[in-house]
Amino acid sequence: MADGDAGASGKSVAVIGAGIIGASCALSLQRAGFKVTMIDKGDPGGGCTLGNSGSLGIASVVPLATPGIVKDIPKMLFDPLQPLSIRWAYLPWTLSWLIHYIRNSTAERVEKIADARNALLKGLFEAYEPLIETADAQDLVKHTGLMAVYEHDDGLAHAQYGINLRRSRGIRVEELSGDEAREREPALGPTVKHGVLFPDVAFTVNPQRLAASFAERAVQDGGILKRAKVTGFEMGSEGPRKVLTDDGAIEADLIVLAAGAWSKPLATELGATVPLQAMRGYHSMMPNPGMTLNSIVTASERRVALTPMEGGLRASGTAEFAGVDAAPNYARADVLTNHAAGILPGLNTEGAKHWMGSRPAMVDSRPVIGRSPRYANVLFAFGHDQIGIALGGVTGKLITELATGQPPSVDLTPYRPDRF
Ligand SMILES: Cc1cc2nc3c(=O)[nH]c(=O)nc-3n(C[C@H](O)[C@H](O)[C@H](O)COP(=O)(O)OP(=O)(O)OC[C@H]3O[C@@H](n4cnc5c(N)ncnc54)[C@H](O)[C@@H]3O)c2cc1C
């Protein structure tokens, strides 16, 4: 949409959260003529957006919970270093969510989830383009494809379920031998037996900077970035009129809630009880790797993504249920370092830096994008679990369509806040 186009007429909007989702919504709304205030308790892109694998994963239609996840539960409970783990102390808080999450792992439900994710993901590059251009952030995105590699025949056999799900939705997939995989990525070691290439996947070399560039551009063009923690809302007769923070109140015609894994209590106040959990992930960043990759590679059996980022080689992954505010267990990041070294024999792991962040995970692996069931002036944009970096542009576009009263370009029924 062109600057100052229909529907906005200078209305004010407060966007809570300036991660990739909030920053994308803010810039998109600003381009549509809204007066935007972003509110974040930290730096733009400093939450989960900072440390992820950076994949603009047009092929990421398959959720983490697929048929067979049930057999991983004993390991999840008894080994804190497994790729999927639950802290015992947190189990009572997450049990009901986990039961529903596992119920969504049947083949029939996964088909529906894949359709819902695909409907959003297939528009990702088109939706990002105007934001990336406006923010002059083209250098942050590389269109190289993504290669998943396997060290065992049964690893590839196990992956066929997801490969078929993708192919049936028109996603391009090419199967490669171990040698063909090494031709693409000479740094891969001899243990790699198979590769699966997704040629249309892109990645960002710095997801934090991508979000920050959107936020900065919004500010350069007249928006406001308020660094404060949102504590609640002042209600008027028709809905919330002010966002309350630990540093004063902000008046707004429209409120967009994009606070990632922290959204749940604020969503409750704004009219929707949502089954949102923090699915925590880790990374290990090797600042002087001594080798490089040409594209993002996932060592699928090890459940680690390897990304050639601006600041070094990043090994990321794992899913831990422990609550959004619990202390990190950086031994999980050490496991990622060891996996990276296992598959990239020339990797220098010296000086590896660790990070933990919380994916905003919904029980049905679909984001919440839509209007509050109670307040017409509140829009929700959170719960993007493993695909938030991919879906910033799409979410910004859909939220802007809702805010300006246009028919949404994707049917929003599967993402409604009141679907549970
Ligand atoms: C290891 C790992 C790998 C991943 N890999 C990928 C990938 O390859 N591709 C992909 O698409 N996705 C990936 N993800 C997921 C992706 O990182 C998230 O989906 C995405 O960052 C979510 O963005 P967000 O803006 O919703 O949340 P966040 O980035 O967490 O932003 C939320 C913001 O809200 C602010 N906030 C929260 N509460 C308040 C409050 N009360 N007041 C003010 N501000 C508040 C926070 O400070 C934060 O800045 C990965 C995640 C992890 C952990």
Image: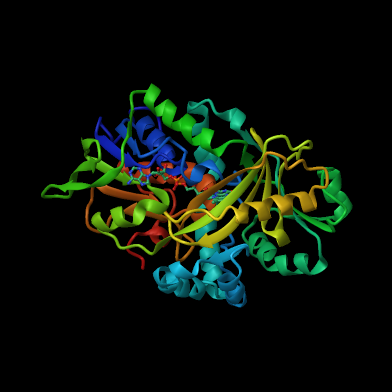
Residue that appears at 55% across and 75% down: 106
Residue 63 visible (yes or no): yes
The total of numbered circles placed on residues is 0
Q: Is residue 339 above or below residue 65?
A: above
Q: Quadrant of residue 40?
A: top left
Residue that appears at 10% across and 50% down: 237
Q: Quadrant of residue 142?
A: top right
Left or right: 45 in relation to 172: left
Of 107 and 297, which appears nearest the observer?
297
Residue 129 visible (yes or no): no
Image location of residue 160, percent across then percent down = 72, 66
Residue that appears at 48% across and 43% down: 392
Image location of residue 240, percent across then percent down = 19, 47
Image location of residue 406, percent across then percent down = 34, 44
Image location of residue 170, percent across then percent down = 64, 56
Q: Is residue 190 above or below residue 164?
A: above
Left or right: 291 in relation to 382: right
User: In this figure, which colouring scheme has been used for the structure?
Assistant: rainbow
Left or right: 163 in relation to 204: right
Of 69 and 104, which appears nearest the observer?
69
Left or right: 367 in relation to 73: left
Q: Quadrant of the N terminus?
A: top left
Query: Residue at the left extreme?
Result: 237
Q: Quadrant of the C terminus?
A: bottom left
Q: Quadrant of residue 248?
A: top left
Q: Is residue 251 above or below residue 306?
A: above
